[in-house]
Each structure stands twice: as C-alpha cells, then as structure tokens.
Amino acid sequence: MLKFTLLAGAVLLASPAVAQTTPDPTPPPAPAPQGRDIIVTAALPQSERDVLQGTSVITGEELARNLRPTIGETLARQPGVSATSFGPSASRPILRGFQGDRIRVLTDGIGSIDVSNTSVDHAVIIDPLLAERIEVLRGPSALLFGSSAVGGVVNVIDTRIPRTVPASGYRLNGIANYGSAANERSGGAAGDVAVGEHLVLHADGSYLKSDDLRTGKGYLLSPQARAAALSQVGLPQPGADEPIDFAASAALRDRLPNSAAETWTAGAGASIITDTGNLGVSYSHYDSLYGVPIRYATAVGQEQEAPRLSVVQNRVDLRGEVNTGGGFLDKIRIRAGQATYRHFELEEDGSVGTAFYNKGLEGRLELVQANRGGWQGASGVQYFNRIFNVVGDEAFLPKNETNQTGFFTLQQYSAGPFRAEGGLRYELTDVAGRVPYGNDRFFGGNRHFEALSGSIGASYAIADGVRIGLNGSRTERAPSAEELLANGPHAGTQAYELGSPDFRLEKSWGLEATLHAHGDGYSFDASAYYNSFSNYISENRVAQSVCEARSDEVDLPCFQYQQGDARYYGFEADASVRLARIGGYTINADLLGDYVHANIVDVGPVPRIPPARVLGGVEAQGDRIGGRVEVEHVFPQNRLAAFETRTDDYTMVNATASLSPFGKDSKTSLLLSANNIFDVVARRHSSFLKDFAPLAGRDIRVTLRFGL
C-alpha cells in the first residue's frame, strides 16, 4: 500500500507540469451546475436529469429524516430500493430486486471492503451518521465500478478526505439522534481545519447504542411460523442441548430479542489542496457489537441460536485529483482503499464460535478527457484483491483469494437536444481456494474468468425540460468465491450451502427506457427495465441427500447454488408537483412506486423479491418551519419460491416536523418525526427473517443537525 501511495502521489504531483506544455486550443467547457442535482458518482459528473439510467440522490434534510443505523434502511424509501432487513443492525440495500454480489456498496467510490456480500447477517461497514450525501445509480453505467454491479451502485460520500479549503479556516458538521423504538442514542461529528494555505486536516467520530427493537403491536412470528411452532409442542427434540419451548416462542410479542447494538467509529484525514488539484489520505476505525435476532426453530432437532457479532475494521484510504489544464486530458483521478476486517460470531457464553477474516485492497485510476466539440469521456483501470478466511465449526468455505483487474471506458457525446453514451469494461478475475493438504471437503483449485461488458444508450430532449432515453447493455459476471467454493453449514442463512467450482460466467442482456420531466413546480422521473440472464446463479433448496453426499454431518436444510436462465423486469417512478403557495410556505405533493418481477426459467420465482409498493406524501416548506406527512403501502407478495411463505401487505403512516432557526440554507435544523404511527406489524419479503423479525413499530425520532 505504501508503494502504491508514493507512486500515486508522484504521478499526481508531476501531472501539472506536463499539462503546462500542452495548452488547450479550445475554450474550457462551461462549469457544471452545482447542488443536489449533480451526480458525482458517475465517471463524468452530470445533472441528475441528464443521466440515462435511473438515479437517486439523498442529502441534507431528506438524509436526516431517513437516517437509520444501516445504509439499507436509510435508503429503503427511495424508488427501486429495498433492504435485506436482517434485524436493525444488518441491512444491505437491494436494487431492482438484486442483492449480494449483483450490487456494489461504495464509500466515496471504493468498496466497503467487508464481508456483507457473503451473508445477510453481516453488516455493511459504512456509517450513515457521517454521510454527507448518498447516491444510487441503477442500470448499465454502474458497470464502471465492476461487473458485479449489474443491479446498481450505492455510493456513500463522506468528508473524511477533505476536498476544499474551509473559507473561514475551519468547518464543523454534526448530528445527534434519538429513536424510541430501540431506545437508540446516536451522534456523529466531522471537522476540518486549514493549516496554512494548502493543508487541511480532518477528524471525525460517531457513536450508537440501542436496545432490543420494539416491533409493531402483534406477534413476532408470522401466522405460518406460529402455526409451525405450535404444531410441534410436546414433541421430543433430539440433538438440542435443551428442550425448545415452541409455545413460548409462538407467544412472543412486541420486542425483538437479541437485537441490541453498540457501535463506534473514529477517523482522521489530511489533504493537500491547490488550484490544480488535491491529494489526501485518511485512516478510520470501526468497532461494533450487535445481536442477530433469533430465527426460532421450526423443525425438530434444530437448535435455537442467539449469536452476537463483534466486528472490527481498520482502513486506510487515498484520493487524488489533478486538473491538467486542458489538451486531451482534463483530469487525472486516483482512488484507493485498503482494509483489514474481522468479526467473531459469539456464543451465548461469550466464546467465539466462528471467526471471519478479510483483507482487501481496491484501487482505481481514471483519465478524464476534456470536452471537445461535445465529446468527452473517462477511461481507467481498477484493481481488487481480497483474502477471505472463515475459521470455526461453521466454516462454510475454505480460505480463498480473489484478484480482479478491470479496464473500462465511458464515452459521451452531446449535440443540442441529443445525447449518446457508450461504455465498455474488460475484467480478469482469478479465484483460488487454499485448502490444507488432506482436506477433501473443499475445492482447492484455481478458476480464471475473462468477462466483457458493455452498454450503449441515447436520449433526446423532446421539449424544454423533458428528455426520453433508451439504453442497452450486455454484461458478464464472474462467480464469487462463495458461489464457487461453499460447502458447509451457514448459521446466518440457516442452511447448509453448496457451491460449484464448475460455474461459468453469468451473462445478461439488458434494456432500459427512461423519462425525465422537470419544470417550474413539477418533476417526474421514471425507468422501465428488462434483463435476460443465462447461467444465472441462484441458491435453491434441494434434497438433503445432495448435501449428505458431500459431508458427514448435515443438520440444516440443504441449499445448492445452481445455474440457469432468468428474467427480470420492472419499473420505478417518482413525481413531485407544487400544489400551492400559501403565505411564506410552498405546498408540494410527491408519489413514488416500484415493481419487480423475477423468474428463473423452468424453476419459478426468484426468492426474496420485494413486492410492489407506492409511497405518497404532502410537504409544506417554509424558510424556517416545514412539515411532511406520508403514507407507504407495500402490497402482498404472492409470487413465491418453493421454500418461501407468503408475505402480507402493510400500510405505514409517517410524519415529520422540521425547524431551521437560521433559515433553510443553514446547516442547523431540528427534526421531530413519528414513523409507523399506527404501530402496524410489517414484514419485508426480501428479509431472511421476515417470518421471525418484523420491522420497527411506532418510532418517535428527534434529530439535530448543526454546522459551522
């Protein structure tokens, strides 16, 4: 990492001198407009309304209003977004029904370097308390961040590496939050100070502590799970250390056992910032202890487990950018991160049951072309390395190493109302299983994959502020280490998992149509999409004999990764309209909706696909006082995989009042919100735990934001 940092710094510091010898014969392009409207995650920052794919940006008061302990729950009200909801402390975003290795969760453009993609009970190591803004990119442009991003990208942008020199020599931003549903107390702060003309130092930290989550008024177990539990009352329980009290578990209400958490983070950074660019580094530490809600056994002989996870990550980051002054290149960017991660799954007596170790390095180098006659682009290389090891009784895959190198380019052309975009990514992936001599349980060989993905699209402004677009993509994804190498019991999913070292590249064709309409007092954004997969990798329940043929002890249901054809299609849309201006207040109404249909050919529905939903709100915005009332209805999910149960519909009502004592442009505000006002029992179909762990009940939240 040290050699990488020194090399990057040399390149960046040398670049301005090179740029001075190649003056740009054409005038520089007009600066991009500023504000929430700009998507910075894209290789070429541009207006949200001009992006060909579906996008979302959440910042400011909207981010504070939706802030939750996990990134998944923070984004769950965005169009096309759901969450895995494995309890209040582990919830990863789901984009267009895709999760796991088909989406990427980034921190400032680089992966979170954790193991959240390997299992739903593993938390994403990104703290929303320190987020400045969050951007969601869905569709083909996300492929610039990896072939595994076929579903999209979530990029959480913080201030840990300063980008600008504070105008007054310092700046401070903070947030404090209280939530009644889990007695949640949390806060975070980040500050910068200028040392001299070009050096900016940064420090930040956060803390969260919560008790067991209070759910809606009703039973924790779904009707199906209660019936299964009650049907086993009085039956003998062979293999369990203690008899399982099924009647007691079926009667549990209102409070989710083993869901408390305590998390703290600390970070420091420094940047050298000049008129021609910047170069910065940072260090961060993440430490968390959280409980995993009990999945009450519904089969004779299964043990009740209530594990807690002790998670630690130490991370170093580098980011640099230099303006070359024009010519062919406009900017050179570099971004890198290296992290060491471990988590222990603790038994009830505090002993370590299974340990997960992960070391990762990811880096990107981008060359951004100058805008010449409406043509601009960005090209680069990305490298990723991960060494992952699971140690313990429930080690479900061997120690393994993944190396991945990707070469990418994105090119854009604009001429009046017409815009076109094309992207290409070539990726080399090597996955190696490192198995000790004499261990014949795991695959110990190497797999090499070469994947080529591309996208092309165009949009046209059919009227002022109204743009339609169409883009297509061809993607190829290498199987992950988990999909190739798994062979063992996995407590997080309560399954014995089997991978296949013979898997081929997963391939898909995609088509997406978009409509953006923005004008005085209204906005409308919609996307409709279709994806056709070959060699689609899914995990399906199979006969116990399949797992028993690979292992002597199989105490959990047998699930095997398999390849086949699959089809995804759906839409997402959101609209806002100004209803009136009354006094000093603007009254707006908004509505969003989304739907996903996913099917594995000759098998049936893809499991854990979010059902259709609509969310509408009315908001009053004033210079100092605001208010919002919203209603979300999630429809039942009746399209079920063979091993799933039906999920009922639910309706939640939420309300928020806000006070900005120094005006709406100030960073200081106080929010009071009531979520799930009617205390309904709500279950998210995409959750592994939806039959055992409902969402939060009535939650009164108080949030204070401040900035200097």
Image (cartoon, helix red, strand yellow):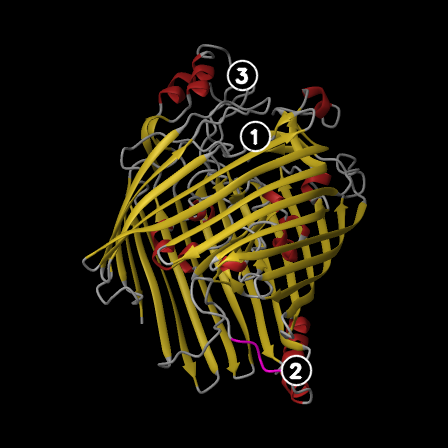
**Disc 3 versus disc 1: nearer the observer:** 1
Q: Residue furthest front?
A: 463
Main SS of the magenta part reads loop
Residue topped by disc 2: 15
Location of the N terminus (image quadrant) = bottom right
Residue situated in front as seen by the camera: 185 or 373: 373
**How many other residues sit within 10 Å of disc 3, few (<14), some (14-19) or many (≥20)?**
some
Q: CA distance from mark 1 to mark 2?
A: 53 Å
The magenta segment? 24-30
Residue shown at 47% from the left, 12% from the top: 232
For label 2, the SS is: helix
Disc 2 marks a residue whose amino acid type is: Ser
Q: Which mark is residue 494?
A: 1
Q: Residue furthest left?
A: 583
**How many other residues sit within 10 Å of disc 2, few (<14), some (14-19) or many (≥20)?**
many
Residue 604 quadrant: top right
- Answer with left or right where residue 663 lies relative to residue 639: left
Q: Position of residue 379 (x, y in %)?
A: 69, 66
Q: Which mark is residue 300?
A: 3
Total labels: the figure holds 3
